[in-house]
Amino acid sequence: MSARILPALHGSWLGGIVDGVVSLVDLMGPLGVGIAIALENLFPPIPSEAVLPIAGLAASRGSFGLVEAIAFATAGSLVGAFALYTIGALVGVPRLRWLFARIPLLDADDIDRTVAWFQRHGRGAVFFGRFVPIFRSLISIPAGVVRMPLWQFALYTGLGSLIWNTVFVMLGWYLGESWHIVERYMDVAQNVVIALVLVAVVVFVVVRVRARRRER
């Protein structure tokens, strides 16, 4: 399958990732899709926007069923999300408060405010976070830090992942050989998210520096 879908990406870092995913899917079928998506959750540079359409393309060629592709992708999302949740739970609030108290421009109270916010809006954050590049993986960590009930985390992660995975698997199914068009648009969306995060960080630093100066 790889020889027919990679020419447009040949030589790029994405081409290397896609080549590995295609080999995994060829070797293991829908289970390979699940493993690839679990790894995508753990390593955000692996784009699900490229992995999922490949699964849809393979399903359209009869390698396995469309429902199988979506089901295994969603199972992989849950496995990866729970791995990050576990990391967050192992770190916990006390360790983060200790760490923040020792980082310039940060306070232990920042963690308390974040925890309070997540306890109020955590379900929505976990669900809608599954649709935001980069954050779709990272949102699992604060959920683990605050020990969000496992059934809630599984429910909202599963629902969000099911919607996301279904959309991109179906795009691969319908677009066929042109599946890589999806990644181009999602790459723009990811760059926008990164830019917004950088702006937010700069604004935070400026505000916090001014506040510290006033305190002195």
Image: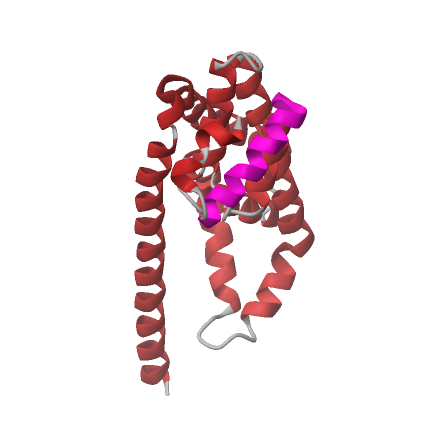
Q: Is residue 40 visible?
A: yes
Q: Is residue 216 left or right of residue 150?
A: left
Give x and y (percent) for residue 98: 61, 68
Q: Residue at x 39, y 21 (%)?
A: 176
Whole-percent x and y of residue 10?
Answer: 44, 43
Picture quadrant where residue 195 is located: bottom left
Residue 200 or residue 167, whichever sits in front = 167
**Residue at x 55%, y 72% (from the top left corner):** 101
Q: Evaluate whether residue 119 shows in this view.
A: no
Q: Main secondary structure of the magenta part?
A: helix
Horizontally, residue 68 falls left or right of residue 198, namely right
Q: Residue at x 59, y 30 (%)?
A: 154
Q: Is residue 155 above or below residue 38?
A: above
Residue range of the region highlighted in magenta in the rendering: 12-31
Residue beneath the point at 56% across and 75% down: 102
Task: Name the quadrant containing residue 182.
Answer: top left
Is residue 34 on the magenta stretch? no
User: Whole-percent x and y of residue 46?
Assistant: 51, 44
Q: Is residue 146 above or below residue 185?
A: below
User: Is residue 54 toward the left or the right of residue 8 in the image?
Assistant: right
